Each structure stands twice: as structure tokens, then as C-alpha cells.
Image (cartoon, rainbow, N blue to C red):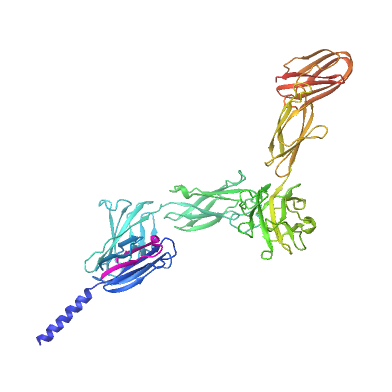
Amino acid sequence: MHRYISFFIGFLLATISLQAQNNCEYQLILNDAGGDGWQGAGITFFIETTPQLFTLTGSTDTFSIALTEGDSISIRYQTGPNNAENSFQLIDSDGQVVSDEEDPLQGVRFNDFASCPICPAIVLGSQMNVDSFDTSVVIDWGSSDSLGIYQIEYAPCGFLNNPDSLLLAQSSISEATLLGLRENTCYDYQISLICLGGDTSIVSGVNQINTIFTKDVGVSGVFAPAFGNKCDFLAEDTLFLILKNFGAAPQTLIPFDFTLTYNLEVIGGNVQMPTDGLFTGVIAKDSCIAFPFEELIDVSEPGEYTINVRTGLDGDSDSSNDSFTTTFTHTFLLPFFEGFEDTTLPDRWSSDEVDPFFTFNGSETVSSILDPLNSRFELTTARYGRIAAMDSLSFSYAFAAADPAGAPSDLVAGDQLLVEISTDCGENYLTLDVIDMVDANPNLAQTLTEVNIPLDGFIGNLVNFRFTALRGGTSFRIVLDDINVYNCVPDAITINNIVTFESVEFEQDGSITVSPIGGIAPYTFEWSNSTDVTMGTSSTITGLATDVYSVTVTDAFGCFATETFNVGIVATDNFADLVDINLYPNPAQDIITLDLALEQAQTLDVVIYNAVGQQMWSSALPSAEQHRLPISLVDFSAGLYFMQIQSEQGQITERFVVNN
């Protein structure tokens, strides 16, 4: 009988002992910095004498390992070819890192016994939700497998270890409300579990939470023109702002306003309440509402628009979210010039090749080889506008040899460059020009050919352009460069200048320097004299005799301006029959008078030039021995002037000064 009782007691003790053995899970995390796996490296994880093999095929992986309290565990590492990229971590059931190695050495890297606590810590990584208010925060987390009471310790950030600042909350479920908080404040918190047996888990944390303001309404967005899928933006469009209640308390009677700026000029906004700009509904915490302005906006023209929307709630605690600004351009302004020198496509241009750039004759271009494997190339511009009178599309092209070492071939039927225009954002295209064998043959293609296409039929439109190269049978390289649309409005270019007269007759030491203002650089210069002889192609010409000279300045778009200059003689006495000359008063203000006495009657031409050689005044005097000529200076600005008096017998130049 005693033997049976002893057997029963032994069995009961063994059962209790087995039940006291706690089970848990460790986490083994393998990492590869290169992302290509361990490539032969691996870990053998021993539980007592039982091995488990682990390796990695990607950048990271996590393995769960079931253990029992007191298990003998060890890690043996086998190196691989890229060992410097490899690392691993072993994390126990309380979330504590017990082994952490980078570029591990071969052999046994860890030896210990499994620790499975009776009251395990919670895993804060399982935290699911935080809902912040102004004076409280609700948090929840994944529940523990053990029963007990959760204890939350919290304090303002940085003060969790200060007993005077520490606050406590307890909960029998995996959710708690932290009370007694200040608005817009950071708090640290940590959680532990007091198990039913009286044991307490280690603390999990620290984590952070933030309270929000009580009264805080702002703008989280704006829409209508900027985010719609419209082609033609409207002259009368409705603007919506998105109001958001960032605070804890519901709000109403929220004033709001906007400013619309077009090309740096304010063209809309500053609405008048209460007919516009007042939200009279109620917006709750974390809620958003889209609300329209009564005032319509005009975003129909090309160029840059900036929309700023803002709220003005009285007593709002946070002004940082009261304003929202967006800038957009639906159509770029003309003119444009694209030479591809930076080997990137401009904003909203597209090509059906990833890298369509090619250096042709020393210049960066857009290009593609068309051959049996590639029969089409397409380049599309952004949207530009509005087309005006005299606007033209200009570009340069070549059908070059597909092989840079070879010679270009003549085109055959079907080989062509198609130039098109769209007025509906690319939905449909109209043909502007077709360049084919008729235009290109015989195809030398050693240089670019420039094409200019008038756009008179599209005045007032917003347009895209498309260039499509098609192969009919010949293999060739299509080359495109200097694509532009320009409008040569009158007086787009003005020419500043400095004119130096010839010092004495026949010395040929005069000069003219010009400096263009307006237009688009670079500029070209073409000079000629009174007999249309070309005098130079730079901004300065020198070695000039007395004559009339003209320069034509042309900008990158082909717009040009022409100016004429007179180069005279600074001073001379080469005037036969001159008895006396007097120019007075000098300096002069309103009137200057020329008195001239000659030995015999002669007709005279009198011309006045300013200091840069521009003709300011002229008069022809009838034949006489005595000449008196009063000249009004009302239209003359202050400065130095030259009066040139010329007859069949010669000329003389006198200087005078005007003081206004």
C-alpha cells in the first residue's frame, strides 16, 4: 500500500515539475547588406544536441525557435564568400538581444541556456493604435499569453525616471487611456505585466506619444485646376480647399481665403465674408471636408500659377498648418528654344527611347537609329502657347548614316520625318510637314538642315508638337536639334552702341561697337557699308573711314533688328572758300546759332550727330556767301554733339555741348 502511495506522489511531483518548465520562442534574424543572400554561409542552431540549419537567400529573414526553460543552446557559424555583408541577431522571449554579430567568424559564436520567464514581457512592436487627444491618449497593444494586470508608466519626454513626474495607469486588457496630460506635449511611456502569480515582467519600451492642441483647424490641400485631368483649363473654374480639424474639439464658423497669382501678379482672391470664405458647418476631430469658394478663378492662360489658401480661426493654437500653397503650370509660355546641350529632355517632353542623345558635328542632339529592328522614333514636346501672329516652328534635322564610320544613304519610299501639331493635349495631331526622299535626296547629311514652319493657322491655340521618324527601307540615324517656337514682335531687340569717329580724313581709325538688349542669346552680327560691302560678323568693327554703316543683329530665334550709324571726322579744316565760322553759344541750352562766311556762294548740308554717331538733325542751306542758321535744341538731351557742314568743296566738323 505504501508502495502505491509513494508511486502516486512521485508521479504527481513529476507532473508538477514538468508543468513548471516554461516554454517560449527566440527569434533568429539573418541579414545580408548586399541583398544577394549568404551564398553558402549558414548557421547551425543546437538545442541540446539537436541541430537546426539556417541560411539566407535575400536581404533579411526571421526564424522562430521553440525552446524550453533551461535548454542548452549554441550557434555555430559557417563562413561564405561575401562574409563581410553577413550579420545575425538572436533575440530572447522578452525582446532582448542576446547575440549580435556582423561579419562573424567561423565556429561557435554563442553558448547559453534558454531563459523562458514565468511572466514574459509584452512586445511593444505589436502596438496597433495610438489615438491622441489634447489631455489624454488612448493606446492599445498585442495582448500577452500570460494573464495579469498591465501597468503603464508615463511622463513628459525625458522625465520617465523622475519620480515627481511619473504617472501610472493599469488595465486588465491590452488597452489603456492615459489621463492628466497637457496639450501639444511629448510623453514617454513603458509597459510591464504583473502576472497572476505575483511575478512582474521586465519593462517594454520606451515609446513616445504626443498630445494635440484643443483648437487647431488648418488646410490640408486644394484642388480644382491643379489636380484635375483637364486639357483646357477654364476661364471660370471653381476652387476647393480641404479643411482639416487637427485639434481635439469640434469647430465651426471657420473663415478662409485664397490668393491666386499668375506670373507673379495677383489676379484673384481676398474674398468678402460672409458671402464667401466662411464654413458654417461643424468639423470633428481628425475630419476633413472639401469646401468651394464662391469666387471663380481664371486659369486659362499659359504660364505659372500659384494658389495660396488659408484659414483664420480665432484662437487657433497652431498657425503652421493654417496655409497651403501649390504652384503649377499647365502650359508653358512661348517662346522656347531647346538645343539639348545638357543631354536631358525638358520638363514634360517625352521620347520613346530612354537615352535619345547623340553628339553630331560637335553638338548635342536628340537622335535614334532606324533599322530593321527599330522602324520608328518619336519625340513629343510639352504644351506651349498661345500661338501668336508671326510665330514659327523652327528645327534642324539630318538623315545621317546609321554607322558613324559609313556614308549616309539616299532615302527610299516610306523613309520620312513627320512633323505634327496638337491643339487638344495630344489626343489628335495635324500634319505640319513631311520631310522625305523628295526633300532629302541626294542625302549628304553631313550637316543639319534648318526648317521653318509658319504657325499662322494656329493663332490663339495651346499646342504640343510631335516629331516622328519612320523607316521605309533604308537604315539611317535621324538627328533633331534646335527645336524652337519664336515670335519676332516689333522692337524685340534694341541695339546699344558706341561710335568712334575717324580722327582725320583718310586715317580709317573709326570704330563701332554694339550691344543688343532683348531677344534670346546667342546673337549673330552682320555689318555692311553704304555700298553693301560686308564689313564684319562680330559685335565690333574697326578700321572705319567716314561712311554710313549698318548692322543686323539676329538672336537665337531668328528675330532681328537693324541699325544704321554715321562715322564722321572728329575735326577738319578741309573746307575751301571758308572765311569765318562761328557756333554759339557753346555750351548751349535752347538754341544754338551757326554763322558761316564763304568767299563765294555755295549750297551746304548741315547734319548733327550725337556722341554715338546717331543722326539727330539735318538741313540743306541754299546757295549764299553768308549763312546764319538758328537751330532749336528743345529735343536734344544734355551731352556732346558734332555738327558736320559739307559742300562740294569739302567738309568741316564742329563740336558743341548741350546743357539742359
Looking at the picture, tell me which residue is in the foreground, 277 or 164.
Answer: 164
- When the figure is inspected, residue 378 is found, relative to residue 56, above or below; the finding is above
Residue that extends furthest to the bottom in the rendered view of this protein: 1
Residue 508: x, y in percent?
76, 25
Rendered residue at 21%/73% (across/down): 20
Where residue 249 sits, quadrant-wise, is bottom left
Residue 586: x, y in percent?
73, 15
Where residue 32 sits, quadrant-wise, is bottom left
Q: Is residue 425 visible?
A: no
Q: Is residue 529 visible?
A: yes
Residue 193 within the magenta-colored segment of the rendering: no
The magenta stretch is: 72-93
Where residue 292 sits, quadrant-wise, is bottom right
Residue 195: x, y in percent?
25, 67
Query: Which part of the image, by quadrant, shows the C terminus?
Result: top right
Residue that extends furthest to the left in the rendered view of this protein: 2
Residue 88 within the magenta-colored segment of the rendering: yes
Residue 535 lies left or right of residue 118; in this view the side is right
How many marks can you see? 0
